[in-house]
Image (spheres, helix red, strand yellow):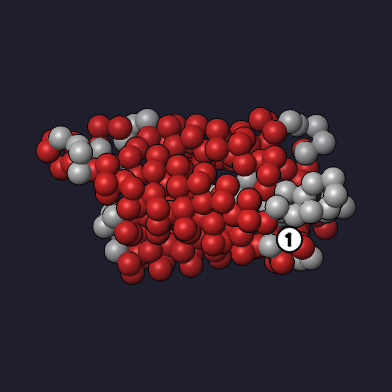
Amino acid sequence: MDFARKCIAEFFGTTIFVLLGCLGISMYASSLDAVGLCLIFALTFIAMYFVLARVSGCHLNPAVSLGMAINGRISWKEFAGYAVSQFVGGFAACGLIAAVNALFGSTGYSANAVYVDAYKYPYVFECLVIEIILTMLFVLVFLAATKSGRFSSVAGIGIGLSLLVLYLVDYGFTGASLNPARSLAPAIFTGGTSLTNVWVFLVGPLVGAVLAAFLYKFFEKGMSPYESAQ
């Protein structure tokens, strides 16, 4: 029952995260700047963290769950359950966005897209590298912020603020992903080139998570015995 409760928490949190974030971009892209749009994602994450952190850890992201599994924070069974729940949550969110679109005559699912220059050249490789590096940084922050119980009261705020900064950097290039569960469903619902290039937003964050996990293990060896035991 505890495992099922964790998976339900990840499903619920990811649904809310993708729903509010993508719906916010879809509806307010013309009236809010990048800071406002990225704040929707960041503040939604912080809110969900306070609700779900003690249940599942509030990953809401297969890349985060992968980093946690490599570092032994969760089991591989939990990783599989979390990842499935997160992807299903993304699809549930897009289903709700489709209902909103039908009711209000709006369109769009805020799918991620690789940067295209004035000559219509898509920067696929460059965006892949950006996704890898920024996700690596985000997962590193998540691993560090959740390692010690001393920071549990402010971990969600720290993680949310780091997500805001990284999303602001990423937004101009890809529309901000760093999260396969945030990218897959919107790409499928949107179709076209969004679906063609969705692999960038699946592979990039997962590679970044692996790098972050091993980099954190390297840093962890330099911690004091007290810190590494937390």
Residue at 78% x, 39% y is 29
Q: Is residue 177 left or right of residue 57?
A: right
Q: Look at the image and tell me in which quarter the N terminus lies.
A: bottom left
Q: Which of 209/100 is in front?
A: 209
- Residue type at mark 1? Ser
- Other residues around mark 1 within 10 Å, as few (<14) / some (14–19) / many (≥20): many
Residue at 34% x, 32% y is 153
Question: Is 34 situated above or below 71?
Answer: above
Going by the picture, which residue comes out furthest to the left? 225
- Indicate the position of residue 110 as horizontal and vertical percent values: 72, 51
- Indicate the position of residue 123 as horizontal and vertical percent values: 70, 52
Q: Is residue 92 left or right of residue 79?
A: right
- Indicate the position of residue 186 as horizontal and vertical percent values: 69, 59
Q: Which quadrant of the structure image shows residue 128?
A: bottom right
Q: Which of 194/153 is in front?
A: 194
Residue at 72% x, 66% y is 196
Task: Name the residue beneath numbered marker 1.
Answer: 194
Secondary structure beneath label 1: helix
- Indicate the position of residue 200 as horizontal and vertical percent values: 61, 59
The reply to whether residue 118 is in sight is yes
